[in-house]
Amino acid sequence: MPNALVRNWHLKISALGLSIFLWALVQNEPLDQETFSSVPVIIDIEDSAWTVAGAPSPPVVELRLGGPAREIIGLARDGTSVRVPVSLVGSSDTTIALQRDWVQLNRRPGVTVESILPSTVRVSFERAVTKSIPVFMRIEGELREGLALSSALGVTPQVVVVRGPESRLVGLDSVALVPLDLGRVRDSDIFTFPLAVDTSGLAGISVVPNEVMAGVRVEPMITRVLEGVVVRADVRGGEARVTVEPATIRLSLAGARTLVTTMDLSFLRVSIPAESLAGMVEGEQRSVLVQVDGVPALVTARPLTEVVTVRRAIDPPEDIGQDPS
C-alpha cells in the first residue's frame, strides 16, 4: 500500500491541484441576472378529447433569470420556452397560473427562475376531431427536353389523418403538399421524391404522416406522324351534309415512347364539331377548327392542318307528283 500511494506522486499532486483550482473557479464565477422577453408559452395538452383552439393569451411572457453568467448566456443562445402541461380539461376557457418549473432551462446548472410576467395565461380549448382526408400534389417546373411522363403522377399514401379543433376541420376536404419540381428529374427512369405536407394555414392541426412519397415515371419523348387521317363532320339530324376540304390531314402525336408506340389508333377521331356548323345554310362555306379525340392521357395530338374548309351541300329539290318513268 505505501508503494501504491507514492508511485507517480507528482502526477497525483498535479491532478489534485487542478481539481481544487477548477472548483474554486466555479465557486467564484460571477452571478448574473437577465431578463428574457418574448418567451413563447406552449400548451402541452394530454387530454385526447380536447385540443387548443388557438394561441394562449398572452402568447409570450417575460422571464427574470439568475445564475452563472456563462450559463445564462448559453441559455440565451439556445432559447427557452414555458411548456404548460394540461392533463385534464375542465372548461373550454381556462386561466392557468404559470409555474417556475415549467420553464425549459435546458439543463443549465445554477440557473433559477426568479419571476414570470404575467404570471397567468388564458387558454381556450375545443373538442378535438380526427378524420382522414386526401392529399393533392402541386407541380412546378418542367421536365428536361427529350423527356416525357409515361404514367400519371402518384403519391403514397394518398390519405393522411388530421386532428384539430372541430371548427377548423369542418371545411377541410384535402391537404396540399409542397410542390414537386419536375426539373429535379434528370433521366428516363422511375423516381421517388419525399414531399412534405404544406402546413401553412394549418396552425393547431396535426397531420400524420407529415410526409408522403411521390412516384414519377419518365421515358424518352418521341414524335409520331400519322398520314391520311380522315376528317369527319358531325352533322345534326335533318341538316344537309357538308363537304370537307382537305378531307384528310396529317396528325402529330408526341409523348413517352411506350404510350405513343402502343396507342390504339381505332379510338382516334378527327372531326368538326356540330357546334361549328350551326347556322350554316345551303351552299355556305366556312373555315373551322378540327377537333381531335381518343388520345390517351399524357399524349399530345397536334393536327398539322388545324383549319379546314367546309361547305354545306345544296340538296336537289324533290320531284313531287311526276311520273317516275
Image (cartoon, helix red, strand yellow):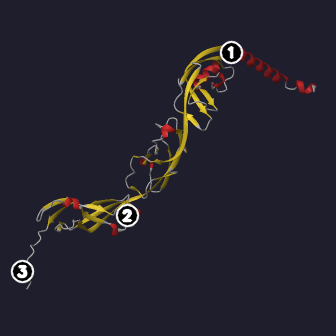
Tell me the tag on residue 322.
3
Give the side of residue 63 with respect to residue 237, left or right.
Answer: right
Looking at this view, name the residue that lies furthest to the right.
1
Residue 83, picture quadrant: top right
Q: Which residue is mark 2?
A: 260
Contact (Cβ within 8 Å) of mark 1 with mark 3: no
The reply to whether residue 206 is visible in this rendering is: no
Name the quarter where the N terminus is drawn.
top right
Residue 52's spot in the image, x, y percent? 55, 33
Tell me the residue at 34%/67% (across/down): 267
Q: Secondary structure at mark 1?
A: loop
For badge 1, the amino acid type reads Glu
- Residue density around tag 3, few if under 14, some if 14–19, many if 20 or more, within 10 Å: few
Mark 1 packing: few (<14 Cα in 10 Å), some, or many (20+)? Answer: few
Residue pictured at 64% horizontal, 27% vertical: 106
Query: Which residue carries the number 1 mark?
Result: 29
Give the Cα distance between marks 1 and 3: 128 Å
Q: Amino acid at mark 3?
A: Gln
